[in-house]
């Protein structure tokens, strides 16, 4: 499914707007649907999805690709 989205950018909006259309089209099982809807980067990766596709999926779904931390983290160490 993610490979399809790489080749068909017009369908990427469905990831945010109505992912069930994609899930139905590609026969995604219920447990995997939940993982794709809310799983973290690590959970998606641990499920066997290639890291590059994990990042793409998270970006297309509007979720962060990494944990956020305060900028002071860099400055406090000086």
Image: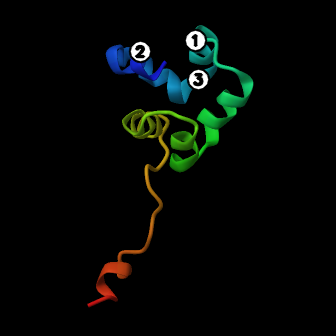
* Residue appearing at x 31%, y 79% in the figure: 74
User: Label 3 belongs to which residue?
Assistant: 19
- Where disc 3 sits, the SS reads helix
Q: Earlier in the sequence, mark 1 or mark 3?
A: 3
Q: Position of residue 68 (x, y in %)?
A: 45, 64
Distance between the alpha carbons at the discs numbered 1 and 3: 11 Å
In-image side of 77 versus 58 (left or right): left
User: Label 1 belongs to which residue?
Assistant: 26
- Where disc 2 sits, the SS reads helix
Q: Position of residue 52 (x, y in %)?
A: 36, 36
Q: Earlier in the sequence, mark 3 or mark 2?
A: 2
Task: List the single residue furthest toward the right.
Answer: 30
Distance between the alpha carbons at the discs numbered 2 and 1: 10 Å
Task: List the single residue furthest toward the left.
Answer: 78
Give the label, 1 or 3, closer to the camera. 1
* Residue appearing at x 59%, y 33% in the figure: 36
Distance between the alpha carbons at the discs numbered 3 and 2: 14 Å
Give the label, 3 or 2, closer to the camera. 2
Residue 4, numbered circle:
2
Q: Position of residue 64 (x, y in %)?
A: 46, 50
In-image side of 21 versus 54 (left or right): right
Q: Earlier in the sequence, mark 2 or mark 1?
A: 2
Badge 1: residue crowd in 10 Å (few <14, some 14–19, many ≥20): few
For residue 46, which quarter of the picture?
top right
Q: Position of residue 33 (x, y in %)?
A: 66, 28
Q: Are marks 2 and 1 in contact (CB under 8 Å)?
A: yes
55 relative to 73, above or below: above
- Where disc 1 sits, the SS reads loop
51 relative to 28, above or below: below
């Amino acid at each position: 499914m993610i490979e399809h989205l790489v080749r068909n950018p017009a369908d990427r909006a469905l990831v945010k707007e109505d992912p069930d259309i994609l899930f139905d089209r590609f026969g995604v099982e219920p447990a995997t649907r939940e993982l794709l809807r809310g799983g973290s980067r690590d959970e998606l990766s641990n499920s066997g999805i290639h890291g590059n596709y994990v990042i793409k999926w998270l970006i297309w779904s509007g979720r962060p690709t990494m944990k956020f931390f305060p900028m002071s983290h860099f400055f406090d160490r000086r």
